[in-house]
């Protein structure tokens, strides 16, 4: 299995810069964006050059560090860093990892003593962003381990697993969430000369499944088959998959899980066909302040993503469009949520609290 792509990297110390793998150009081109100011990070998040819940949080944390570059006093640096937190929080509304990471950066900004030299302040911010990045990498690895153990029980040799959107190294600081589980299962199966196939939904309208998940799976040698989103029912009916696994952008206290549009439909289909439906996400994706998924803000994106997807008009001028980017799989349809802290099953408020606690993890 080859190496994971370098999705997000920070070069230098407190006065460093951020490099992002530009995901809008994949799979055709492997191009990198150097971000040297807050606005370029805001723009990269907004137009999905960097995307996926944990990756958005990590990129935003580094983005805050860029705010201090032109400042000469602590007051100036602190004001700029707090303004950066506010600005980056406006980039996308659904993935709670963004707000969690910015809250953590705010904590560091406000906790620093008034006589801290600016260089020290900048260094400390970069250290915090790096810590968020490193912790996510470790969380991905733990999710992979827990999830592979679980899926090994339900996916027979030669079987199949369906996934949606992109939840791999492109979406996180490590190997991914749902895809980390599939990478780990693939490694385990290889050791015993067995295999399984990943069915990847293309994920309309922006094709994160076709462009990004298929790219990651092929790069890393995992057997994979691409399908259109509308084929999932047929694939389940034909018995080609024994499990569905997806990531999440925000999970409410009762276990309702928001993820890429189409996830809710898959959960309903899986229930109908008796296929277990798993969500894989780090504890940083839980928003325990929200009682249920009804309270999760759902991002609506531009109509052009549907009418002019990839440089070609596919609907008549004047066509009215509704483009919600996420939907919510109700807890009742989720067999288990795989976190770095362990597996939540059955998915109830009590079990969520037992595994991820009642506090937002620090
Ligand atoms: O709009 P995107 O591409 O940022 O949406 C990403 C997803 O919905 C992922 O499934 C989710 O963030 C989990 S990523 C580990």
Image (tube, helix red, strand yellow):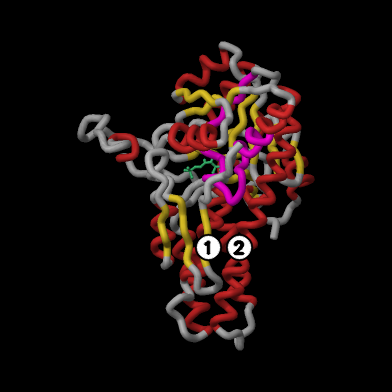
* Residue 103 shown left or right of residue 149 in the figure: left
Tag 2 near tag 1, CB within 8 Å: yes
Disc 2 designates what residue? 130
* Residue 310 shown left or right of residue 116 in the figure: left
Magenta stretch, residue numbers: 159-184
Depth check: 246 or 21 in front? Answer: 21
* x and y percentages locating residue 352 in the rendered image: 73, 43
* x and y percentages locating residue 123 in the rendered image: 58, 74
Q: Is residue 261 visible?
A: no
Q: Residue 213 magenta-drawn?
A: no
* x and y percentages locating residue 29 in the rendered image: 38, 43
Q: Residues within 10 Å of mark 1 (few under 14, many from 20)?
A: some
Q: CA distance from mark 2 to mark 1?
A: 8 Å
Residue at left offset 59%, top offset 67%: 105
* x and y percentages locating residue 235 in the rendered image: 54, 16
Disc 1 designates what residue? 10
Q: Could you say whether the residue bearing mark 2 is in a helix, strand or loop?
A: helix
Q: Quadrant of the C terminus?
A: bottom right
Residue 275, quarter of the rendered image: top right
Residue at left offset 49%, top offset 32%: 214
Q: Could you say whether the residue bearing mark 1 is in a helix, strand or loop?
A: strand
Q: Residue 166 magenta-drawn?
A: yes
Residue at left offset 60%, top offset 13%: 239
């Amino acid at each position: 299995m080859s190496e994971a792509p370098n999705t997000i990297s920070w070069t230098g110390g407190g006065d460093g810069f951020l490099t992002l793998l530009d995901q809008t150009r994949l799979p055709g081109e492997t191009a990198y964006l150097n971000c040297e100011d807050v606005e370029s990070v805001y723009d990269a998040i907004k137009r999905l050059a960097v995307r996926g819940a944990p990756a958005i949080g990590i990129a935003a944390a580094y983005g805050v560090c860029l705010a201090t570059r032109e400042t000469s006093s602590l007051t100036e640096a602190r004001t700029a860093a707090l303004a950066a937190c506010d600005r980056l929080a406006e980039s996308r509304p659904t993935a709670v990892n963004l707000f969690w990471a910015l809250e953590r950066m705010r904590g560091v900004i406000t906790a620093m003593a008034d006589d801290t030299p600016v260089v020290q302040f900048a260094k400390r911010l970069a250290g915090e962003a790096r810590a968020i990045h490193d912790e996510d990498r470790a969380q991905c690895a733990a999710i992979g381990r827990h999830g592979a153990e679980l899926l090994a029980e339900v996916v027979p040799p030669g079987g199949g697993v369906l996934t949606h959107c992109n939840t791999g190294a492109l979406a996180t600081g490590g190997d991914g969430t749902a895809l980390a589980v599939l990478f780990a299962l693939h490694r385990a199966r290889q050791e015993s000369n067995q295999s399984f196939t990943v069915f990847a939904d293309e994920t309309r309208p922006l094709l994160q499944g076709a462009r990004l998940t298929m790219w990651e799976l092929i790069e890393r040698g995992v057997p994979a088959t691409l399908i259109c989103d509308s084929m999932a029912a047929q694939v389940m009916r034909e018995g080609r998959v024994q499990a569905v696994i997806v990531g999440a952008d925000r999970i409410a206290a009762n276990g309702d899980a928001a993820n890429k549009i189409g996830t809710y439909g898959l959960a309903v289909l899986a229930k109908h066909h008796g296929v277990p439906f798993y969500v894989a996400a780090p504890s940083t994706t839980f928003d325990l302040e929200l009682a249920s998924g009804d309270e999760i803000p759902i991002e609506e994106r531009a109509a052009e993503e549907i009418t002019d997807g990839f440089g070609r008009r596919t609907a008549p001028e004047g066509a009215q469009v509704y483009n919600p980017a996420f939907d919510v799989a109700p807890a009742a349809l989720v067999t288990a949520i795989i976190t770095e802290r362990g597996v939540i099953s059955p998915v109830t408020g009590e079990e969520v609290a037992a595994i991820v606690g009642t506090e937002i993890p620090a």
